[in-house]
Image: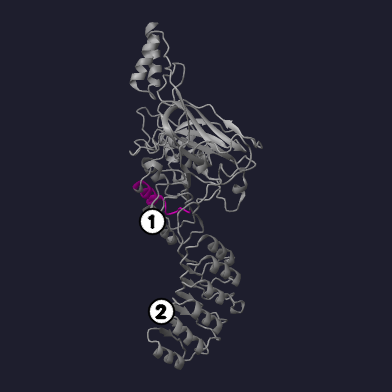
Amino acid sequence: MLTLLSMFYYICLRRRSRSGTRGEALTSRRAVESGQRAVLPVSVEVEQYAKEVLDFSSHYGSENSMSYTMWNLAGVPNVYPSSGDFTQTAVFRTYGTWWQQCASAPPPFIRVPKGFYSQEYIELAFEEPVYPTAVEVLETYYPGAIVQILACSHNPFSQNPPTDVSKFLTGALVWRAHQSTNTQARQFSPTIKHINFPTNLLRLEVNSSLLEYYTELDAVILRGVKERPMLALYKMPIIDINDLSDSEEELSDVGIPFKQEEEKMGNGYFDKLPYELIQLILSHLTLPDLCRLAQSSKLLQQHCCDPLQYTQLSLQPHWARLSDASLGHLQSRCTLLQRLNLSWTGNRGALSLTGFSSFLKACGQSLVCLELSCCHFLNEACLEVVSQTCPRLQELNLSSCDRLSPQAFTHICKLPHLRKLVLYRTKIEVRYLSLYDCAIDDSDVVASMLAARCHSLCSLDLWRSRNLTDRGLAELASGCKMLEELDLGWCPTLQSSTGCFQQLARSLPRLRKLFLTANRSVCDSDIEELASGCPSLQHLDILGTRLVSAASLKKLLQSCTRLRLLDVSFCSQIDMRTVQELSGQFPNVSIKKSFTQ
């Protein structure tokens, strides 16, 4: 009997040792054998507010302001215990289901785990690493959005790179599936799990879809002790996210082939089912379950590895454990991949350019939708790979990829079928923009947005913008003062009688290139205004106008001494004799005059 009990204790201790050290297991075993409990050491609890906001998925405020931004979560409370809508709080970009109901909202991915509710996140750094005893979130308006709290073993203030980038542990799942109308402030302190490492990096994940309005957070408090507490025997140990157990999902085994047993076992009648029916049944499994099932039999391995099971793939729920090896294992299965969600993945070195490139080269040919929100591993080389390996890409989400250099976005123009592009919180600096012959429903709206957002715009090509009016051009001229190149060729809705060209000349003194090709309304008044207002003009195209005289052209050539190109083709008042005379007087200017025989 004693031998049987000893074996039972040994098996229990072996399971406990998966998350603890060998020394702890032996200590616990001696405590059991001696009939004593492990004693919890007395340690002083430390209370600290967030020192720094490291990363987040979105916020309501502007990058150049503190109002409604995530940066308000650093430090002591600004508002609590007051309730209401305050600019000093942290507010995410969305709430409710309104954004999912918009036509621009992407369709949901299949195979998302039922327990994954997170839509947004924020990562906070604290001064001292501690073993957490409590986490408190001060919510001041429409509380109830927090669905998960996680801890990371990496010290964000350390100069050394993390040795284990996937060490996030589930702390507290506090999701409640009901609509919340409460607006009162509260101090939210969920029950958390004990972890076996000190942390000063917390991640809060939220879901605001059931809230009536924006949730507002004021501060986060981390309580803990600096010395590792010795847990009593009856307390279950925390399981590492990388430790495969009966209850934890794991992606590192997705590429392990089926191991044939020595004793062959039949499949019963399962293999008698039609292939399509088995595929339909497997389509309801989550990705980790599908990967595990592939190891159960040769027949199921064939079905689970069928590329038709992987036309859509969302790896966002598995962001904490995804690595180059994971992508490598999935690579052979995703040859027909059409929609891929890698949002939140690859940070802190989990994904490399090599792993990302290898996967897209093998699986990007049929890709039409690529979600890369908050992927901070992305660089210019990654976007170049996307442009080279995804020729059919129609939708690209680079939301909150704020570490991409402005030069990296030049590769996006190589995607010929792109129709949806999300650049929220990126550092793209639009200085050269070509909308040449684009089928734009309302060019005035585009011009208005450029005027409001792109004050550094230097070059703009609106060739054949068929519905651009004087109103849109006026807004563009007033908002984009840095414009040096502007192509308005073949824009038939622009009329000189509105004064739009004269106002343009007065508003853009830096203008060096102006194409007014095929605009028959351009007249002498416009040319004279250009002569007085645009001394740096180098290229001018007024092909096709009937209202410009030789006198106004001569005045332009005298005032704009840097002019090098002047196209007066099909200008009825300018004949070849006039062109020859002006060319003789201004030999540095190439004056073009097309003709037909």
Measuring 38% from the left and 15% from the top, which residue is drawn there? Answer: 28
* Res. 62 in view: yes
Q: Residue 320, relative to residue 42: is it above or below?
A: below
Q: Residue 45, relative to residue 554: is it above or below?
A: above
Q: Residue 380, relative to residue 207: is it above or below?
A: below
Pinpoint residue 596: horizontal percent, then vertical percent.
47, 89
Which of the labelled discs sits on residue 384, or is there none?
1
- Under mark 1, the amino acid is Glu
Which quadrant would the N terminus be assigned to in this image?
top left
User: Local crowd at mark 1 within 10 Å, few (<14), some, or many (≥20)?
Assistant: some
Residue sticking out furthest to the bottom: 577
Pinpoint residue 116: horizontal percent, then vertical percent.
52, 37
Which of the labelled discs sits on residue 201, or is there none?
none
Question: Residue 578 or 417: which is nearer the viewer?
Answer: 578
Measuring 41% from the left and 43% from the top, which residue is drawn there? Answer: 347
Residue matched to label 2: 562
Span highlighted in magenta in the image: 354-368
Label 1: which secondary element:
helix
- Under mark 2, the amino acid is Arg
Of marks 1 and 2, the one in the foreground: 2
Q: Main secondary structure of the magenta part?
A: helix
Question: Residue 257 or 577: which is nearer the viewer?
Answer: 577
Which mark sits nearer the N-terminus, 1 or 2? 1
Instruction: Answer whether residue 444 is magenta in the image.
Output: no
Measuring 39% from the left and 25% from the top, which residue is drawn there? Answer: 19
Label 2: which secondary element:
loop
Pinpoint residue 292: horizontal percent, then vertical percent.
43, 34
**How are the residues colored?**
one colour
